[in-house]
Amino acid sequence: VMIQIDELMFSYRGRRVYDGLNMELRDGAVYGLLGRNGAGKTTLMRLIAGLLDCNSGRITVNGMTPFRRDPVFLNSIYFVPESFNAPEMRVSDYAATYGAFYSNYDGDAFTDYMKALSVDPEAAFRRLSFGQRKKALMAFALSLKTDILLLDEPGNGLDIPSKLTLRHILSECASPSRTIIMSTHQVRDIEDIVDHVAIIDGGRLLLDASTREIDCLVQFVESPQADADALFSERTAGGFVNIKARRNCSIDRTHSRMDMEVLFNACVTGGRNFVSSMMNRNKKEVSYVL
């Protein structure tokens, strides 16, 4: 799977959302599409899914234009919105009816996912709570086994045990032949799942890097006070989390757990200056303290 975005221009109700966005999403990755509310995350996912058309520029998925809604394209992609109108039917009937349109639909997998997420497949969609509906649609989406899976705010409406179960399921579903894109502003919900981070703000792509690349460039160090040598420091309940540049990626390297929320805050606060200083670990730049 290859999603190519070239010079994307898109406006909504007179507001410019994207102004020349360029981005490439490759197969076999689990992307975290991060941004503040109103940053354009949902809009971008709807454009990729073919539910919206760009004003100018181009989006292609394996060479196909999403908005043309070619059957081959539709068979390869599924979009789970943040909320949706529940139909007047049982969840099992919904899955059987609409799963027939997808060549890789697995009814047994759907049953297993519903059981893991503690949702009754024989319940009527409209009788389920918002969180239960979300889990049922997520189970259906996963059972389709599409090449591309788009999840908009997947953790919204889910309780903590359900979020943990969903993380486990998504980790198991990741494969070299599947691209999963999750958009959220609740970074903690996905930080243990993603292996690639894309941060957008004000219609700009601030950061586009794999978690391995980020880990190679910077480390996250906790300390009682802000570190003067840090690229970014954020105050937490237990002190400060400092993002510090690594001087060598391969020799005498100590790993630190990435704090994706702090990374996100650093990018949207420091913008392109912070990202530039992070991507060039041998260049000292101004520090940012939040």
Image (tube, grey):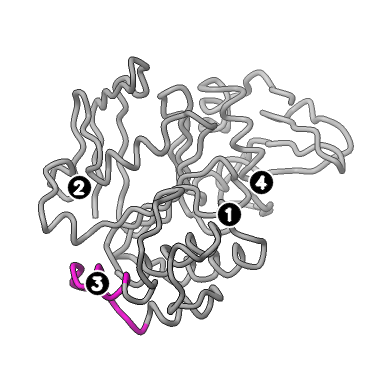
Work out whether 208 lies above or below 205: below
Measured in 3D between alpha carbons, the distance from the residue under mark 1 to the one under mark 2, in whole angstroms, is 30 Å
Element type at mark 1: loop
Residue that badge 3 annotates: 97
The x, y position of residue 44, in whole percent, is 34, 37
Looking at the image, is mark 1 or mark 2 earlier in the sequence?
Answer: 2
Element type at mark 2: strand
The x, y position of residue 161, in whole percent, is 66, 67
Nearer the observer: mark 2 or 3; the answer is 3
Residue that badge 4 annotates: 259
Residue that badge 1 annotates: 157
- Residue type marked 1: Gly
Looking at the image, is mark 1 or mark 4 earlier in the sequence?
Answer: 1
Residue 61, label in figure: 2
- Residue type marked 2: Val
Pointers 3 and 4 in contact (C-beta within 8 Å): no
The x, y position of residue 268, in whole percent, is 57, 27
